[in-house]
């Protein structure tokens, strides 16, 4: 698919401006590497898919190269962003297929010569080249000790300017030094996207930027955005804030770590719902007013996880409630191709209660996109993931849900669920993938 085609698919999913666009760094911001259970990330996932995916945009803005970004996706329970900004703002891609924005490449080519950068940096013994995967067309990356960083940056800037280049040198994480074209960076990449949306007549109604380190500072400099520095933000970002944005009420320093801080900021700025379904105690008859079909899908799969982890009570009330939410003739097509009644699948859950207790087992859904196909029926497409230990499996799901409003509550009934293994997935034991 062409860049225009992929951009169109990304943007045309929304009939109007995005209600909210979240632009978040990954390492130590969206992803907490000190949380082996990934709870804050999973809390965000459930909130985003239940309340925002259908009318908002998720943008990941990371210093990671495409190689290391894809590696992180295999290691952590991450959602699929609508747009990915990688390599410290030097690469912009759209959609799951990550089609590059060639217009951004043209912007970055101005007054940039990678060969000259490589030549001049080789004269600085303090600079240690990062791995080959981190060297990109518009980014040359090194490690440098904190004690030498300021002096090296100043001298290198002068040398490159004398060679006719217009570059930007970013130091972050107390060790990473990135050399980019002057027009590059996380902030400029975001500004480029916002201008693109404006030209389309679809500027986001609200934008929230999220970060923890020096290479995120530019994000907070974009006019009109809300910003959150997570509680574990590094000294370099806090210092930048103290010097440049201390009295700006649209930028806050959260009291919660990583994705928890992002959820906190959504509530602080009043940008929309900020209660994750994972923070709500499960009850057999829990329903919300105005809850949409996406929330129903998230809630159903979250209950499934809690059932297998023995985090809800083993009782007939839950089974009866689940059956009541399924049409008597409702059908389920297992990824293996086997078809059976939904009620049969629910009954089979009795046998697997607590079979994942004490294990690193999680279930989450991604790309939950509902379409109303009649006055009382929704077609919902989504991707379901299961994590057990270090192994991830996923399937592509299509569900048909009918609904009625009773006493102000939206009550959904599952009429059909069809699952197909995602590429590269497939259970070694099909019996362990029940729903």
Image: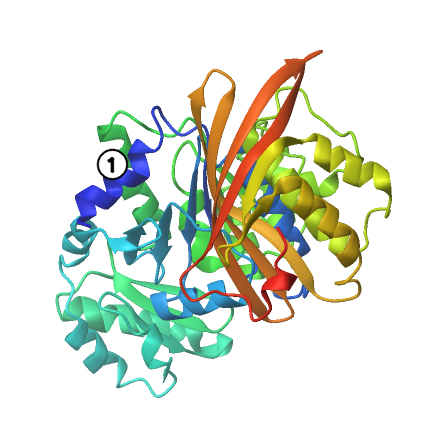
Name the one closer to the observer, 139 or 314: 314
Image quadrant where residue 109 sits: bottom left
Instruction: Give the x, y percent position of residue 173.
Output: 51, 67
* Residue to which mark 1 is pinned: 196
- The outermost residue toward the top is 407
Closer to the camera, 235 or 64?
Answer: 64
Disc 1 element:
helix
Q: Is residue 61 left or right of residue 303?
A: left
Q: How many marks?
A: 1
Is residue 149 rendered to the left or right of residue 274? left
Q: Quadrant of residue 406?
A: top right
- Which residue appears at 22% of the width and 51% of the height? 101
Above/below status of 137 relative to 330: below
Q: Is residue 63 visible?
A: yes
Q: Is residue 164 left or right of residue 302?
A: left
Image point (66%, 47%), residue name: 345
Residue at 65%, 70% in the rendered image: 389
13 or 233, which lies in front? 13
Q: Nearer the viewer, residue 82 or 153?
A: 82
Image location of residue 415, percent across then percent down: 56, 32
Residue drawn 20% across and 70% down? 160
Please rate how many residues cluster around mark 1, counting C-alpha atoms within 10 Å: few if below 14, some from 14 to 19, many from 20: few
Measured from the top left, where is residue 42 in percent x and y?
Answer: 62, 51
Residue 26 showing in the rendered view: no
| x then y, percent, for residue 300 | 65, 40
């Amino acid at each position: 698919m062409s860049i225009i085609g992929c951009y169109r698919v990304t943007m045309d999913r929304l009939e109007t401006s995005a209600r909210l666009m979240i632009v978040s760094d990954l390492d130590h911001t969206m992803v907490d590497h000190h949380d082996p259970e990934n709870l804050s990330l999973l809390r965000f996932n459930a909130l985003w898919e239940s309340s925002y995916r259908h009318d908002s945009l998720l943008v990941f803005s990371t210093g990671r190269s495409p190689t290391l970004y894809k590696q992180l996706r295999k290691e952590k329970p991450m959602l699929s962003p609508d747009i990915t900004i990688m390599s410290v703002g030097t690469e912009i891609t759209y959609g799951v297929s990550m089609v590059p924005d060639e217009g951004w490449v043209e912007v970055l080519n101005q007054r940039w010569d990678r060969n000259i950068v490589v030549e001049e940096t080789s004269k600085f013994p303090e600079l240690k080249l990062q791995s080959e995967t981190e060297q990109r067309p518009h980014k040359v990356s090194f490690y440098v000790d904190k004690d030498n960083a300021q002096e090296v940056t100043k001298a290198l800037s002068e040398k490159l300017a004398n060679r006719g280049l217009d570059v930007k040198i970013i130091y972050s994480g107390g060790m990473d030094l990135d050399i980019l074209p002057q027009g590059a960076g996380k902030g400029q990449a975001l500004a480029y996207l916002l201008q693109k949306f404006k030209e389309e007549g679809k500027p986001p109604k609200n934008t929230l930027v999220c970060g923890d380190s020096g290479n995120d500072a530019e994000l907070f400099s974009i006019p009109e955005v809300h910003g959150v520095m997570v509680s574990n933000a590094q000294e370099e970002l806090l210092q930048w804030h103290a010097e440049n944005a201390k009295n700006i009420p649209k930028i806050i320093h959260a009291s919660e770590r990583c994705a928890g801080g992002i959820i906190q900021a959504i509530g602080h700025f009043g940008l929309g719902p900020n209660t994750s379904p994972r923070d709500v105690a499960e009850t057999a008859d829990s329903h919300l007013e105005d809850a949409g079909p996406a929330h129903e899908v998230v809630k159903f799969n979250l209950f499934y996880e809690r059932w297998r982890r023995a985090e809800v009570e083993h009782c007939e009330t839950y089974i009866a409630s689940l059956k009541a939410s399924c049409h008597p003739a409702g059908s389920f097509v297992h990824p293996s191709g086997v078809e059976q009644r939904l009620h049969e699948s629910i009954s089979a859950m009795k046998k697997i209660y607590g079979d994942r207790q004490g294990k690193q087992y999680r279930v989450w859904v991604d790309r939950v996109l509902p379409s109303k196909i009649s006055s009382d029926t929704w077609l919902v497409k989504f991707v379901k993931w299961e994590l057990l230990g270090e192994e991830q499996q996923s399937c592509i799901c299509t569900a048909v849900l009918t609904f009625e409003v009773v006493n102000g509550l939206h009550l959904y009934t599952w009429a059909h669920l069809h699952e197909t293994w995602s590429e590269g997935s497939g259970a070694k034991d099909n019996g362990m993938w029940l729903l």
